[in-house]
Image (spheres, rainbow, N blue to C red):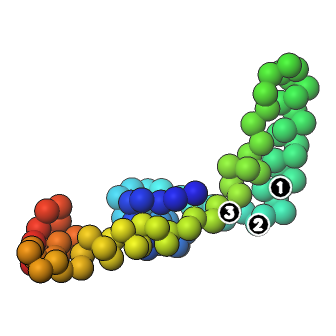
Amino acid sequence: SLNLLDPDLPTRRELIRRLKESNPTLTVARLPRPAISAGGLFVLGLSKVLRPGKKAIDIRRVFARQAFDTSASQELRDRMTEPKPDRPALDLAAGAGARS
């Protein structure tokens, strides 16, 4: 996968912190991977029994870790922010289109 939005991906802990800041009543429950895997197998089997012939959703895939290669977006950001002789560098931290 390629993430073109931000080469510095937040951690899960950072994402949870952001969610709790915007929604203080949010409750987070951490489940161990074996529990997700066992529950996923149960739900997968149950959905195949209750909905034969229809594609079952495997929740283990939903919660699986995803590896993102951010090197292309990092390179693009570096190229966009490096100063050129005929124009100043973009300051991406200051907002869209801000020049330094």
Mark before the other along the chain sequence, 3 or 1: 1
Check residue 65 in the rendering and tell me which mark sits there, or answer none.
3
Which residue corresponds to mark 1? 37
Q: Residues within 10 Å of mark 3 (few under 14, many from 20)?
A: few
Q: Label 2 sits on what residue type?
A: Pro
Q: CA distance from mark 3 to mark 1?
A: 13 Å
At numbered mark 1, what does the secondary structure look like: helix, strand or loop?
Answer: helix
User: Residue 18, can we see it?
Assistant: no
Q: CA distance from mark 1 to mark 2?
A: 9 Å
Nearer-the-camera pick, 31 or 1:
1
Image quadrant containing the C terminus: bottom left
Q: How many marks?
A: 3
Mark before the other along the chain sequence, 1 or 2: 2
> Looking at the image, is mark 3 or mark 1 nearer the viewer?
3
Which residue corresponds to mark 2? 32
Q: Is residue 44 left or right of residue 80?
A: right
> Looking at the image, is mark 1 or mark 2 nearer the viewer?
1
In the image, what residue occupies the spot 57% across and 65% down?
68
